[in-house]
Amino acid sequence: MTDIHEIVHNENKSDLGNYRDSILKRFPKIFVFLAIGLFVFSLTQDCYYTNEHVQSGLDGWELLLIGWLGMFYGYFAWLANPVLLISWIFAVKKQFRIGIIIATGSMLIMLSFLFHKSIVISEAPTYSKIFGYGLE
């Protein structure tokens, strides 16, 4: 004979399992939305500073629009943006491993900017020393 406590315990376990499965199914989409939100927030911040005493860098949204021009001068970090977009697409399509691998590649491309000591600031081209990065 089945005890009433055993029945209630099994039903609660089933509900908890369903809830956990529901959260796990939604986690990748939640993660992508948080990543997009963080990306949009980063577009409002200074990216780098070219003057020691004055913040004369560009905001993220400006670099998103014109950063592709840097590829003509050897700055390939802007390519991380379309690569990141591709990783989000894979994550939304529930191909998480591929999305994570591509996002990691995007991060490595982004970090390549830190190896540059100067940046083109005009079409002449005029170079200026990078003194710092945003959110300092």
Image (cartoon, grey):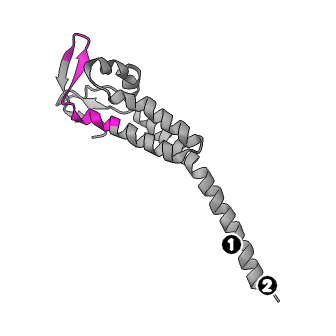
82 w.r.t. 8: above or below: above
Query: Residue 4 has which mark?
Result: 2
What residue is shown with label 1?
13
Q: Which image quarter: residue 134?
A: top left
**Mark 2 or mark 1: whose residue is earlier in sequence:** 2
Q: Is residue 133 visible?
A: no
Query: Which residue: 69% across, 62% down?
Result: 18
Residue 122, horizontal then vertical, whole percent: 25, 14
Q: Which image quarter: residue 23?
A: bottom right
> What amino acid is labelled 1 in the image?
Lys
Query: Which residue: 37% across, 19% down?
Result: 66
> What amino acid is labelled 2 in the image?
Ile
Magenta residues (range): 109-126
Task: Report the quarter where the C terminus lies.
Answer: top left
Q: Nearer the viewer, residue 11 or 72?
A: 72
Give me the C-alpha separation between circle 2 and circle 1. Answer: 14 Å
Query: Which residue: 59% across, 56% down?
Result: 24
Badge 2 vs badge 1, beta-carbon distance below 8 Å: no
The answer to whether residue 16 is left or right of residue 2 is: left
Task: Report the quarter where the N terminus lies.
Answer: bottom right
The answer to whether residue 73 is left or right of residue 84 is: left
